[in-house]
Image (cartoon, rainbow, N blue to C red):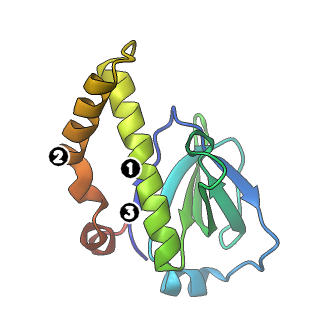
């Protein structure tokens, strides 16, 4: 099973149950390419089919996956959503990069609406962190 990218706690994410059949834990472990770890208010069983969506990115930011693991935290649950095809994993990784950049810009300059400074901060984030989202790094280290 591949690595799970951490979704920023302060950027909205939704998990919705799907009508696809669940996967066994064993099968999921074998075919998972990695995924996204996100904070959620409820627990899910491993293998449950879900759609992960990022509302701040619009209606097209929906990624079908399966719950790989779920851990209780003081804020609710940390849920690992695994993806089983490269196209979905690629889309989710790109969505996660946008969310990470959005969070970085808000932390660095929370009151700035200046497009030039936001672009500069986004470039700065890419220079520092984009390698963490490469295909090679995702397949190297499990969570």
- For the residue pair 30 and 99, the one nearer the viewer reads as 99
- For the residue pair 82 and 123, the one nearer the viewer reads as 123
What count of labels does the image hold? 3
Residue at the image point whose x is 77% and y is 80% from the top: 21
> Viewed as shown, does residue 135 lie left or right of 79?
left
Mark 2, residue position: 127
Q: Disc number at residue 143?
A: 3
* Residue 103, quarter of the rendered image: top left
Mark 1, residue position: 97
Q: Nearer the viewer, mark 1 or mark 3?
A: 1
Q: CA distance from mark 2 to mark 1?
A: 12 Å
| Image: 63 above or below 57 | below
Sooner in the amino-acid sequence: mark 3 or mark 2: 2
Q: Which secondary structure, mark 1? A: helix
Labels 3 & 2 near each other (Cβ < 8 A): no
Give how far across and how far down residue 126 sits, in percent.
24, 46
Q: CA distance from mark 3 to mark 2?
A: 24 Å
Sooner in the amino-acid sequence: mark 2 or mark 1: 1
* Residue 19, quarter of the rendered image: bottom right
Give how far across and how far down residue 111 sits, in percent.
39, 12
The 10 Å Cα crowd at callout 1, few under 14, some 14 to 19, many 20 or more, is: many
- For the residue pair 21 and 111, the one nearer the viewer reads as 111
The 10 Å Cα crowd at callout 2, few under 14, some 14 to 19, many 20 or more, is: few
Q: Which secondary structure, mark 3? A: loop
Q: CA distance from mark 1 to mark 3?
A: 18 Å
């Amino acid at each position: 099973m591949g690595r799970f990218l951490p979704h920023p706690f302060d950027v909205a994410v939704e998990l919705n149950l799907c009508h696809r059949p669940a996967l066994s834990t064993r099968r999921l472990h074998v075919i998972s390419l990695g995924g996204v770890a996100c904070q959620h208010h409820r627990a899910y069983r491993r293998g449950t089919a879900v759609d992960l969506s990022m509302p701040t990115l619009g209606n097209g930011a929906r990624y079908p996956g399966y719950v790989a693991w779920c851990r209780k935290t003081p804020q609710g649950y940390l849920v690992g959503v695994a993806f089983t095809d490269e196209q979905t994993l690629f889309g989710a990784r790109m969505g996660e990069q946008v969310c990470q950049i959005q969070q970085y810009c808000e932390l660095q300059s929370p009151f700035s609406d200046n497009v030039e400074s936001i672009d500069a901060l986004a470039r700065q984030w890419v220079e520092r962190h984009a390698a963490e989202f490469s295909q090679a790094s995702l397949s190297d280290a499990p969570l």
